[in-house]
Amino acid sequence: MSKKNYSAPPPHPSGARPPELPKELVPRHVAIVMDGNGRWAKQRGLARTVGHEAGEAALLDVICGAIEIGVQCLSAYAFSTENWKRTPDEVRFLMGFNRDVIHRRRDELDAMGVRVRWAGRRPKLWRSVINELEDAERRTVANDKITLQFCVNYGGRAEIVDAARAMAVDVAAGKLRPDKVDERAFARYLDEPDLPDVDLFVRSSGEQRTSNFLLWQSAYAELVFLDTLWPDFDRRHLWHAIEVYASRDRRYGGAVPNPPPPAAS
C-alpha cells in the first residue's frame, strides 16, 4: 500500500516558492547532468573532491524543488561509464561518496516519499555501492511522490547496447519474433522501462552537450543549459529551467501550417 503521510520538503532558506504553472506545463521527467564540481573547487583553490562534496546539498535541494513543483521523475547523472577514465584517486572517492550519500540520505528521501531507482551497469561497480542502491530501492519501493533515478556507472550507449543484446538473446531463443521488434518492444529492455521519456534535460556549468546521458529517453527532450556550477545550483535554478521548458512549443516533429498569404487587394 502506498504511503500517505509523507513529510513536506524543507523550504528553501530564501523562502522562495515554485512558480505557479498549469500541471500540463510541468515536465513529468527531468534529467540533470550535475556538472561543474571540479571547476567550482578549482576557483576556490580546493581539491576536486571538495566540489563533489559540495554538490550533495545541491542535489538534495533540487529534489525538494522537484517535489514542490510536481515533477514526477528526476534522473541524476551520478557516475558515467566514462568517469572510469579519471584518476584512480578520484574514482575511489566518487565510488565511496556515491555509496555514502545514498546511505546518509535514504531515510530523508524515504520520508519525503521518494522512490529510488538505479540505472547502470554492474561490472566494475563496487559491491558496496550496489548494496546501498539496492537497499534504497527496496526501502522506497512503495513511495509515489517522486521517482529519483540514480544513474551510477551509466552510459546511454551502454544502455542501448545492453538492451539490444538482451533483445537478441530473446529473439534467438524464440521468445520474441523479429517482425515484432519495434521501438516500443525495444524500450522494454532499457534499464527502467516503466519511467516516462525525458521531457526536460538540464545541464549545469555552461557546457552544452548531453554527454551520453539517457540518449534513447531524451530523443524529444527540451534542452536547457545553465551557466551555474553544480555546487551553486538549487531548486530555484530548476524552477527557472522548468519555466523555460513551459514557454516552448513541443511539436515532436510535427508543424503548425503556415497561415495563407493575405488576399491581394
Image (cartoon, rainbow, N blue to C red):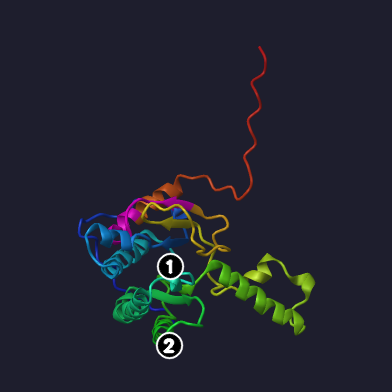
Q: Residue at x 63, y 30 (%)?
A: 259
Q: Quadrant of residue 177?
A: bottom right
* Residue 27 position in % (x across, y down): 46, 57
Q: Nearer the viewer, residue 85 or 134?
A: 85
Q: Is residue 127 found left or right of 156 in the rendered image?
A: left
Evaluate whether residue 20 shows in this view.
Answer: no
Q: Nearer the viewer, residue 122 or 177?
A: 122
Q: Is residue 204 found left or right of 232 in the rendered image?
A: right
Label disc, if present, on residue 127 of the rendered structure: 2
Instruction: Please state the extent of the stretch shown in magenta in the rendering.
Output: 223-237
Q: Is residue 84 found left or right of 265 in the rendered image?
A: left
Q: Up-down: is 236 above or below 152?
A: above
* Residue 257 position in % (x across, y down): 65, 36
- Mark 1 and mark 2: span between their CA atoms? 19 Å
Q: Nearer the viewer, residue 111 or 245?
A: 245
- The mark total stands at 2
Q: Quadrant of residue 190?
A: bottom right
> Nearer the N terminus, badge 1 or badge 2?
1
* Residue 225 position in % (x across, y down): 42, 51
Q: Up-down: is 233 above or below 195?
A: above
Q: Residue at x 51, y 78 (%)?
A: 121
Tell me the quarter of the image containing the C terminus.
Answer: top right
Circle 1 crowding by C-alpha within 10 Å: few under 14, some 14–19, many from 20 = many
Is residue 233 one of those drawn in magenta?
Answer: yes
Which residue has dot 1 on it? 77
Q: Residue at x 22, y 59 (%)?
A: 44
* Residue 228 position in % (x across, y down): 32, 53
Circle 2 crowding by C-alpha within 10 Å: few under 14, some 14–19, many from 20 = few
Evaluate whether residue 247 shows in this view.
Answer: yes
The three-letter amino acid code for the residue at tag 1 is Tyr
Is residue 18 one of those drawn in magenta?
Answer: no
